[in-house]
Image: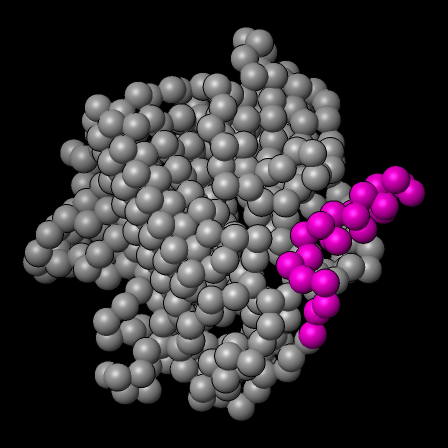
Amino acid sequence: MRSTLFSFAALALVCSPGATQTTIEVSGGGDAIAVAVASAKPGDVLLVRAGSYAGFTVDKGIAILCDPGVQTFAVTHFQSASVFVRDLPAGELFRLRGLTIGRDFYFPGLNVEDAVGAVYVEDLVTPRVSVKSSAHVSLNGCDVQGDQAAALDIEDSSVCVANSRVATVSFLYATPGMSAARSRVSLRGSEIRGSDGSMPLSVAGEAVLATDSELVFGAGTAGATMLLVAGDPSLPAVLATNGSVRLDPSVQFVGAAAVAGSATIDVRPQPSIDTRGAAAGEVWTVTAHSEVGSTTTTFLGVPLTPLPTPFGDLWVFPWAGLQLDSGVVGPSGTRTFTFTLPPMPAAIPVMVQPIAILTSGDLILGAPAGAILN
């Protein structure tokens, strides 16, 4: 236990985005978040109290942690409800937790653009998410509802999605729940739905539409599987042109096929991680889903722009992390690690990834999950 506590303390120091951390309380609604963001320095933590706020733009490694009841709204056609994360520098980490973003007249709810640093988002409710030219974006526990365009639109980026629901409704033309172009995307324990054509003038779309992208759909067990739903049973759940798709056999789908298109398809066990954030003093739970009988090891570390390897993408720095658990996966198909978090700085972002030796002898780097601790 002593070495584990020391490792967590060391990891907190490594993950901390700045040498000093100032906590700023934000309340009163209106443009209070935007004003606080403008004055905050990298490493600062904004604690936002319940209220309705205008949208805002962030370009620095700060944390915005919202109480229940925090939402953004569009005051006029000229004042956006959306959140923009732009030009985040390398080595800085932006964290956002617990925000409900109102419908905007022009933009997706969350827009991440040209972020070289890592972006962690947890427990977000938003009309749409757009990620463009960004190195490492983690979405965990998010509810994303699209309208007239893909609910989750990814271009030239690396994105990790866990425990989220992504669905879209469209009129006049087919729209997928998620679109990916020239990107690396890892998904686990999530539901992705294309437009279903059930409303007048609406047209059905695939759950996922991908071009020149590398996709991973990770393992799950009862109640925690991936679900891919095409809007029409004659459509494939995933239509992937070029690139590759790694698909765990547990993934459930509604459509003519799980995957169609010219992408390389690899159907075999893909281990995955199920975890959410927790506060100091709380029990943090990490569950690895993997093939029964496989030997699976779970690592926690700081985020890494996904590094392609012959075994899958590496999402964490293994030399600056911690082995949480290792062993043979039993009949449940899971291994669970629990730990009471010690005191640590607020809003520590971590990435947890499994690596498994399958019963076939294959080595697989699995689907990770990001979490905001404390």
Locate the C terminus by quadrant: bottom right
Q: Would you say residue 265 is visible in this rendering?
A: yes
Depth check, front residue: 214 or 16:
16
Horizontal side of residue 90 vs 199, given as left or right = right
Residue, far right: 2
| Residue 317 percent coordinates (x, y) | 63, 37
**Residue bounds of the magenta highlight:** 1-22
Q: Residue 224 in magenta?
A: no
Q: Residue at x 74, y 53 (%)?
A: 12
At horizontal 35% and vertical 27% (from top left) the residue drawn is 245
User: Which image quarter is the N terminus in?
Assistant: top right
* 79 relative to 177, above or below: below
| Residue 141 seen in the figure | no
Colour scheme employed for the rendering of this structure: one colour
Q: For the point 27% across and 41% down, which residue is it?
A: 181
Q: Position of residue 116 (x, y in %)?
A: 46, 52
Q: Is residue 8 magenta?
A: yes
- Judge by depth and name the residue closer to the eye, 126 or 16: 16
Q: Residue 358 appears in which quarter of the rendering?
A: top right
Q: Position of residue 277 (x, y in %)?
A: 64, 55
